[in-house]
Image (spheres, rainbow, N blue to C red):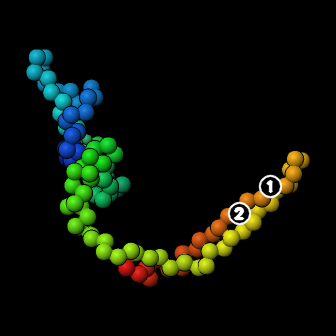
Amino acid sequence: MSDFVWCHGPNCHTHSTLDRVRGSKGSKVLRTRKITQRRNQYYNPANLYNYFCSMHCYNEFANKHAQQIIKIEPRTKPLETRIDDPVREKHTHNYSFGEHSYYTTTINKIDTDNNVG
Ligand SMILES: [Zn+2]
């Protein structure tokens, strides 16, 4: 037994896909998609795909409600993650046509629980 929610995308019912077509001949509609909630051991209520049928619908919701969403957790100053001094490393390979070098930089986080902000 599983229950469902309707997609929260504000325009879900306007996207022209055959799976949204409902109704009888002569009175067809595009209907908001239904999202089955499989409440098994893998169910994660924080997963946005439990409430949105697609990233497209999620983006439309987020764009429509951006001002309300940012009020949930206002960001008045930047967050910071402490890191060790970045380590730059040179890598060199020798080929028949010559030498090729490139650099990589490793960033090591120290302790994400001590983030400032
Ligand atoms: Zn949708």
Q: Position of residue 49 (x, y in %)?
A: 31, 49
Q: Residue at x 78, y 59 (%)?
A: 101
Q: Position of residue 43 (x, y in %)?
A: 32, 54
Q: Which residue is mark 1?
A: 100
Instruction: Determine whether, in the image, residue 56 is placed left or right of residue 33.
Output: right
Instruction: Please indicate, yes or no, whether residue 79 appears anywhere in the rendered image.
Output: yes
Real-space Cα distance between discs 1 and 2? Answer: 11 Å
Label 2 crowd bin: few (<14), some (14–19), many (20+), radius 10 Å: few
Q: Position of residue 117 (x, y in %)?
A: 37, 79
Which amino acid type is shown beneath numbered disc 2? Tyr
Q: Position of residue 115 (x, y in %)?
A: 43, 79
- Above or below residue 9? Residue 85 is below
**Quarter location, residue 70:** bottom left
Q: Which residue is mark 2?
A: 103
**Residue lying at the far left of the rendered structure:** 27
Secondary structure under tag 1 reads strand
Q: How many marks?
A: 2
Q: If the image is split into quadrants, where does the N terminus sit?
A: top left
Instruction: Determine whether, in the image, residue 12 is placed left or right of residue 105.
Output: left
Q: Residue at x 71, y 63 (%)?
A: 103
Which amino acid type is shown beneath numbered disc 1? His
